[in-house]
Image (cartoon, rainbow, N blue to C red):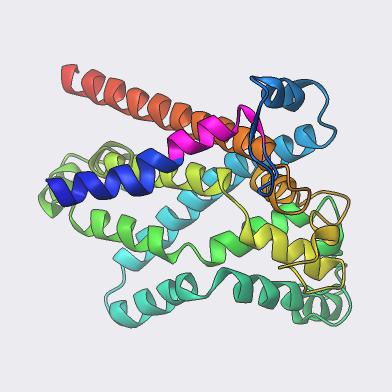
């Protein structure tokens, strides 16, 4: 166990303890850390102008993206599991978008959804429909990011598909003989059988949304007309801070403003929230499993 324990202490234990320590200091990566206690946390909840916007955008993504990602992956996997021909090809095609690098995939989506010359709006105009501004509209930027994530959710789809194919067919046959229709079979057989995998998908999607960074940075910068996302943080959050997520604002504080102590405090809060969400979901799953077993 020594190699695994050593790796855990070096790559998780020490960084976590160091982050908690730096969150209680004023640190700019140049001068030695200066102990200030809980001032960073007090500032976060009292005098930070954009922390509320960043938290709202992240919470929006946590709710909408998690629900849509799990439902989309489950629906796609359910359709693929019923195919009789071309299963391997369709499964591969649905999984391929998950292999695309996040930055490149975001730039492609920004081009495809370009309000002027993007193919989507051109097709919609051909049908007589106004396609909107997509990433250039504060009201549409987060839904556009959600579409981007759904397009690349092939990894979760493959996991759910494996769970669907593992459900015993005898249960479906018995339910059919008892007169259960497709909806009842799905509700009483499929969902209980794959509930642990669905819970994994929910937890995975929530953590993914809480840490949503690359796509938001690239989309905001591209919408502002610049691809210089590495060093030019001026356009991060465009349009009108609608893509300013909590991790993006953490990055700006730490690497643009050199407020590394404050950024560490934000990271600690993000860790606590992620841990709390995961613990609550796992507890609810166990409680539901006990109720089902008792019934």
Residue sitting nearer the eye, 229 or 165:
229
Tell me where residue 66 appears, x and y as whole percent: 53, 45
Whether residue 25 is in magenta: the answer is yes
Residue sitting nearer the eye, 26 or 226:
26
* Left/right of residue 176 with respect to residue 227 in the rendered view: left
User: Is 235 placed above or below 65 here?
Assistant: below
Q: Can residue 285 be seen in this view?
A: yes
Give the extent of the magenta segment.
16-26
User: Is 143 placed above or below 289 here?
Assistant: below
Tell me where residue 134 appears, x and y as whole percent: 80, 63
Q: Main secondary structure of the magenta part?
A: helix
Residue, x 17% and y 16% (percent of image)?
294
* Left/right of residue 262 with respect to residue 274 in the rendered view: right
* Left/right of residue 247 with respect to residue 78 in the rendered view: right
Residue, x 30% and y 77% (percent of image)?
87
Tell me where residue 94 appears, x and y as whole percent: 43, 73
User: The N terminus is located in which quarter?
Assistant: top left
Residue, x 58% and y 41% (percent of image)?
62
Residue found at the far front of this picture? 32
Tell me where residue 204 appears, x and y as whole percent: 42, 46
Residue, x 18% and y 55% (percent of image)?
166
């Amino acid at each position: 166990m020594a190699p695994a324990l050593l790796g855990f202490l070096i790559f998780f234990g020490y960084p976590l303890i160091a982050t908690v320590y730096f969150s209680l200091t004023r640190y700019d990566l140049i001068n030695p850390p200066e102990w200030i206690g809980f001032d960073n946390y007090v500032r976060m909840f009292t005098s930070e102008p954009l922390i509320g916007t960043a938290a709202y955008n992240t919470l929006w993504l946590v709710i909408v993206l998690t629900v849509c990602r799990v439902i989309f992956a489950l629906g796609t996997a359910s359709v693929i599991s019923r195919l009789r021909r071309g299963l391997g090809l369709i499964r591969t095609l649905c999984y391929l978008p998950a292999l695309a690098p996040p930055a490149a995939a975001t730039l492609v989506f920004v081009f495809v959804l370009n309000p002027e010359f993007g193919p989507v709006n051109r097709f919609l105009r051909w049908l007589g429909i106004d396609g909107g501004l997509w990433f250039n509209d504060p009201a549409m930027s987060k839904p556009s990011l959600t579409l981007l994530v759904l397009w690349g959710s092939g990894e979760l789809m493959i996991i759910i598909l494996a769970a669907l194919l593992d459900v015993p067919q005898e249960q479906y046959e018995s339910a059919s003989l008892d007169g259960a229709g497709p909806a009842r079979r799905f509700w009483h057989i499929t969902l209980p059988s794959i509930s642990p995998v669905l819970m994994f998908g929910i937890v995975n999607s929530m953590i993914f949304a809480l840490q949503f960074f690359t796509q938001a940075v690239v989309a905001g910068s591209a919408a502002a007309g610049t691809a210089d996302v590495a060093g030019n943080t001026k356009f991060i959050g465009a349009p009108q801070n609608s893509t300013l997520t909590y991790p993006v604002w953490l990055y700006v504080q730490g690497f643009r403003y050199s407020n590394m102590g404050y950024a560490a405090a934000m990271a600690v809060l993000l860790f606590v929230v992620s841990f709390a969400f995961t613990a609550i979901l796992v507890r609810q799953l166990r409680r539901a499993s006990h109720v089902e077993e008792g019934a």
